[in-house]
C-alpha cells in the first residue's frame, strides 16, 4: 500500500536584529494517504515559570517503531520517557542556509520513513520450525505470507 504525505513549509522570513539574525521555520505534514501524519517526535520539557506552558522540543523524524510506540499529542504518563508525536516541527535558526538544510533533511527523512512503512507490508516467508511432538512442517499458504499491518 503506497503512502504519502504533503510537507508544507512556513517561514517568517529573515529577521535582522543588528548582529543577531533569526529565521523561524515550521514544517507541517498534511494530506496523509494511508499513513499517520504525526511523524515528528517531540520531548516534553518542564513547565516554564514565565508562561506556565510546557517547554516541548522537537527531537526527530519518527521511525517505523516510533510510529506505534510514541503517542500522539502528549506523552503517555505511564511511560518513563516523555516523548510524543505531532504533525509539525518548528525551529528558530540563525540563518536561512540552516533552514534550507533542515527543510531538505526533513524531506529526505520523511521519505525514508514512508518507504520503510511500505516495505513492512511485504513480509516474505523465511522458515518453519516444528516444536514439540509434531509431524513435518507444512508450507504456509500464500495468503498468510503477506502482512496486513498498517502504520
Image (tube, rainbow, N blue to C red):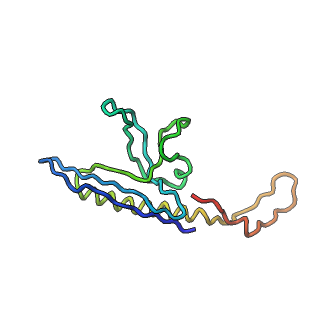
Q: In the shown orientation, is residue 47 left or right of residue 75? A: left
Q: Position of residue 23 (x, y in %)?
A: 24, 52
The N terminus lies in quadrant: bottom right
The C terminus lies in quadrant: bottom right
Q: How many marks?
A: 0
Q: In this view, which residue lies farthest toward the top?
A: 49
Q: In this view, which residue lies farthest toward the left?
A: 18
Q: Please name the residue shown 39% across and 33% down the image.
A: 46
Q: In the shown orientation, is residue 16 left or right of residue 129? A: left
Residue 25 sits above or below residue 48 on the image: below
Q: Position of residue 35 (x, y in %)?
A: 53, 60
Residue 109 sits above or below residue 1 on the image: above
Q: Please name the residue shown 50% across and 47% down the image.
A: 72
**47 vs 81, nearest the viewer:** 47
Q: In the shown orientation, is residue 58 left or right of residue 116? A: left
**85 vs 50, nearest the viewer:** 50
Q: Please name the residue shown 67% across and 66% down the image.
A: 146
Q: In the shown orientation, is residue 71 left or right of residue 90? A: right
Q: Position of residue 87 (x, y in %)?
A: 44, 53
Q: Quadrant of residue 11?
A: bottom left
Q: Please name the residue shown 66% across and 63% down the image.
A: 147
Q: Position of residue 24 (x, y in %)?
A: 27, 52
Amino acid at each position: 500500500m503506497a503512502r504519502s504525505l504533503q510537507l508544507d513549509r512556513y517561514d517568517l522570513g529573515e529577521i535582522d536584529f543588528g548582529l543577531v539574525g533569526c529565521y523561524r521555520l515550521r514544517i507541517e505534514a498534511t494530506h496523509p494517504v494511508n499513513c499517520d501524519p504525526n511523524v515528528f517526535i517531540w520531548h516534553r520539557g518542564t513547565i516554564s515559570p514565565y508562561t506556565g506552558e510546557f517547554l516541548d522540543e522537537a527531537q526527530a523524524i519518527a521511525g517505523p517503531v516510533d510510529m506505534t510506540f510514541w503517542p500522539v499529542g502528549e506523552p503517555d504518563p505511564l511511560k518513563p520517557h516523555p516523548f510524543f508525536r505531532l504533525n509539525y516541527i518548528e525551529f528558530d535558526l540563525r540563518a536561512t542556509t540552516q533552514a534550507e538544510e533542515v527543510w531538505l533533511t526533513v524531506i529526505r527523512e520523511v521519505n525514508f520513513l514512508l518507504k520503510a512503512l511500505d516495505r513492512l507490508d511485504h513480509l516474505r516467508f523465511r522458515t518453519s520450525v516444528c516444536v514439540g511432538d509434531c509431524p513435518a512442517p507444512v508450507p504456509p499458504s500464500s495468503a498468510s505470507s503477506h502482512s496486513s499491518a498498517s502504520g
